[in-house]
Image (cartoon, rainbow, N blue to C red):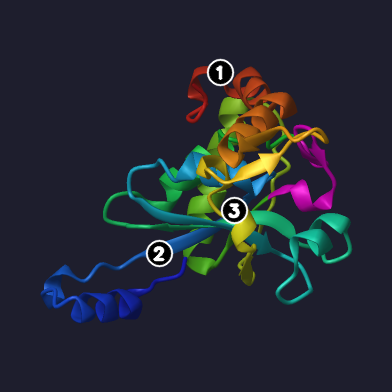
């Protein structure tokens, strides 16, 4: 949990807002496989202000996407979720997180395999109780062993701009060698469907899956 009252205060003063209206925000960091998907899921949650795709849990400072997915840095693909604690609590976000992943899979998520696609929660002392409670509740509800660990808080490194807001980007990508281009948003939909993410989440969580249409 990272409180940013000074940043909010500075922003409020810069805009000439009354001091009482300065907003305090907090953050959590979670790893749920492909960070495009986790970003897409949580940006629509009421009370969430921003979701940034990046990396956490490794040993290399400022790693690149290629370094992380190539292995050896120890990082997970992760997202940093900034939220308004007056509108949504960390425990609620963790509950949603567990029901948006396959927490029984220790080898990756869905079609994405390997260490960088494992699931985890990175929690400081202030959020650990909420994270543990959410994990226990999810395991009781699912009736299966949950392997998603709750790790100590770790530095978060944002991914490069190419990976931010991928799921809703209009930037066009080549999807074949014969000059067929589609927006990133369309490529994302094809990837998510083809990877089987939503199908597996529905299989596990049924009506409790919060982000599956």
Disc 2 and disc 1: Cα gap in Å?
30 Å
Label 3 vs label 1: CA separation?
22 Å
| Residue 171 rendering spot, x and y as whole percentages | 57, 46
Instruction: Name the mark on residue 206.
Output: 1
Residue plotted at (54% across, 47% down)? 39
Task: Give the structural element (helix, strand or loop) at label 1.
Answer: helix
Q: Residue placed at 53% from the left, 45% from the top?
A: 169
The residue where tag 3 is placed is 30
Q: Residues within 10 Å of mark 2 (few under 14, many from 20)?
A: some
Which label number is shown at residue 26?
Answer: 2
Circles 3 and 1 in contact, beta carbons < 8 Å: no
Relative to 111, say whether 88 is above or below.
below
Other-residue count near label 1 (Cα within 10 Å), few / some / many at <14 / 14–19 / ≥20: few
Q: Secondary structure at mark 3?
A: strand
Magenta part of the chain: 105-119
The mark that comes first in sequence, 2 or 1, is 2
Q: Is residue 16 above or below residue 143?
A: below
| Magenta stretch: includes residue 55 | no
Position of residue 20 in the picture relative to residue 98 (left or right): left
């Amino acid at each position: 949990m990272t409180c940013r009252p000074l940043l909010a205060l500075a922003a409020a003063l810069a805009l000439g807002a009354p001091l009482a209206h300065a907003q305090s925000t907090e953050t959590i960091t979670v790893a749920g496989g492909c960070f495009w998907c986790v970003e897409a899921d949580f940006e629509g949650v009421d009370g969430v202000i921003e979701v940034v795709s990046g990396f956490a849990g490794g040993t290399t400072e400022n790693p690149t996407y290629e370094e992380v997915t190539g292995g050896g840095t120890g990082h997970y693909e992760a997202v940093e979720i900034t939220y308004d604690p007056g509108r949504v609590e960390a425990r609620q976000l963790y509950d949603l997180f567990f029901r948006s992943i396959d927490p029984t899979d220790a080898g990756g998520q869905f079609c994405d395999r390997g260490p960088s696609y494992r699931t985890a929660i990175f929690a400081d002392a202030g959020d650990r109780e909420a994270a543990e409670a959410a994990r226990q509740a999810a395991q009781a509800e699912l009736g299966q062993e949950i392997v998603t660990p709750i790790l100590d808080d770790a530095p978060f490194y944002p991914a490069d701009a190419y990976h931010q807001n991928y799921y809703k980007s209009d930037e066009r990508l080549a999807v074949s060698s014969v000059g067929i281009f589609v927006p990133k948003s369309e490529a994302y939909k094809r990837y998510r469907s083809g990877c089987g993410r939503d199908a597996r989440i529905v299989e596990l969580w049924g009506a409790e899956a919060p982000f599956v249409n």
